[in-house]
Structure formats: C-alpha cells, structure tokens
Image: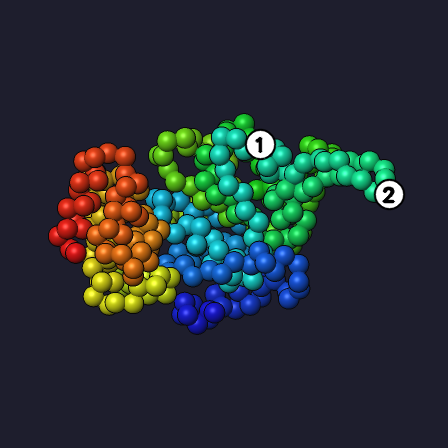
Amino acid sequence: MHTNYNLPENIIEILNTNQRENDDTYQELIRQGGYVPPHMDLLIDAISALSMGKNVLLKGPTGAGKTKFAETLSNLFHQPMFSVNCSVDLDAESLMGFKTLTYEADKQQIEFVPGPVTSAMNGGTFLYIDEINMAKPETLPLINGVLDYRRTITNPFTNEIITAKDGFNVIAAINEGYVGTVPLNEALKNRFIVIDVPYIEGEQLKELIQTNTRLTNKSTIDLFVTLSSDLIRAVSQGKLSEDAASIRALLDACDLSVIIPPKRAILRSIVDKLEEGREREFVKNLADTLF
C-alpha cells in the first residue's frame, strides 16, 4: 500500500504508528483510496498534519480529486471515515443525529440515532465534511469545539457532553467561488491546515486513467491527457469555467469511449454539462481537433 506511493521512510513509520488497530468496527467505512497526487508533498503534508491531530482542509477546483484524496488518507491510516455532504439544508440533526420513537416490549420509548459527527467522535474515526462552504454560516459554529484542541461538543438533543476518542480527525473540502458557497469565517478557517489540491496532469493523469477506467488503448489515453491539458489551460486563461476541466468528468469520458466514439463520450461527459453555448463549442472544437 505504502510502496505504491514511494513515501519517505519517516512517513511510512508515521502511518504504521498511527494506523487504527485491527478491529471489525466500521470496517466498511475504510475507503478504497487510489488518489494519484500531482506532487507527493500533498500526500506527505496531509499525513503529517493528521498524525498530529490537526484538521485538514482540501481546497481546489471541482473534479480535482479532493474526495478521492480524503478516501486515500482513510485507506492509508486504515481509518473508517464518516461523511457529511454540506448544503444550505444542513442542520444540527444532519450533523449530530436525531430522536425517534421506538418500541421495546410493547412500550414506546424515545431513542437517539447518532449522526456522522457523534459517530466519528465516539468511534475515534475520520470525519469528512464535503463542500463545507455550502453550509449556512449559522450551522457550522455548532462544531467549532470539535475542530479545536477541546475535541468536545454538547449534543443539543441529549445534552450529553461528547469528547472525541483517540484517532478522531476531521478532513474537509471546499470549492471556492461557486454559486451557493460562502466564504469560511476566520474562526473556522484557522482550525484547519489548508492544502491546495490542483488538477492532475501529465504522467499522473495517464496513470490515473489506466488504473481507474476501462480504457486501455495507449494512443487514446494520450489524446485524453492532451485534451485535459488543453482544458486546464483554457480555464487558467478564463476561457472556460472550472467544470470543463473536471478530472472526474474526463474519467467518465474515458470509460464511455471504450464503447462509444470518444467525441460522443466527451459530449456526454463534459460538453453537455456546461451552461454557456460558447464554452460548449470551445470544448467540441478541441475534441474535433484531437479525435
């Protein structure tokens, strides 16, 4: 597992020291991993921060692999990972859990069903908060105590004071500048180590396509790598929105191209997702040039 990343010896030692001891608790929540970092420093820095009990914030464009990055950290630490997908509808129940009516021996009783935050704290696991800047500003302060040195929260539904068990860590991800997102306030941002996650390019992208899609034709893989490079360049020049250069969308196109023509695969996976006609024509012209 570690040798695939060719990690330095001291980082391998950190992982071995901090890996969760083998038990059957939440084994299904240990993720598969597979993230291919454009720079190994990204992985080394994230491992170092988590091993010290620090929260990690993955910042980058959509489709750059932030979720896969978090899943790889779960895999490397052999740590189960609960997830929260943020939105404007996120509330305390979505984070902490909720009360429900149950029956035992024909008697009705109230039972608390734990949410991802309480489950991760009580289980000493990772907690992944995706698109954290999509949540309403008034919701996130609820977990400020979880994110600082206290690692403690009062459950508003049971009044129980919960202190996280050893092994608990928080990984969050944001896409900045998107509709519906809000800037993170300084109090929240200061509770994280920030890692900027860029798009994967070149040989790393080629390896990702080979290992994560069904596409095996080397010349076609090379063309998709070139297409991705052209899309990323166009995004940096302001000609396209970041959605156009999504690595996730590119991998979908690679998969589809095994069965349907590549240009149609690009149409379904990338072009038809774009809002502006000008952008759709730009990407179609790139595809026509290459394929």
Label ID, residue 50: none
Question: Mark 1, residues whose alpha carbon is within 10 Å: few (<14), some, or many (≥20)?
Answer: some
In percent of width and height, residue 197 lies at 37, 50
Residue bearing mark 2: 105
Label 1 to label 2, Cα distance in Å? 33 Å
Relative placement, left or right, of 152 versus 281 is: right
Which of the 4 quarters of the picture holds residue 152?
A: top right
- Determine the residue positioned at 66% across, 62% down: 24
Of residues 198 and 41, the one nearer the viewer is 198
* Amino acid at dot 1: Asp
Q: Residue at x 54, y 46 (%)?
A: 83
The amino acid marked with disc number 2 is Ala
Q: Do we see residue 253 in this rendering? A: yes
For marks 1 and 2, give the one nearer the viewer. Answer: 2
Badge 2 density bin: few <14, some 14–19, many ≥20, Cα 10 Å: few
- Horizontal and vertical percent position of residue 262: 23, 55
Q: Which residue is mark 1?
A: 91
Quadrant location of residue 260? bottom left
From the viewer's perspective, tell me whether residue 43 is left or right of residue 150: left
x%, y% of residue 281? 17, 40
Residues at discs 1 and 2 in contact (Cβ within 8 Å):
no
Residue 154 shows up from this direction = no
Most foreground residue, 98 or 60:
98
**Sequence-wise, which precedes: disc 1 or disc 2?**
1
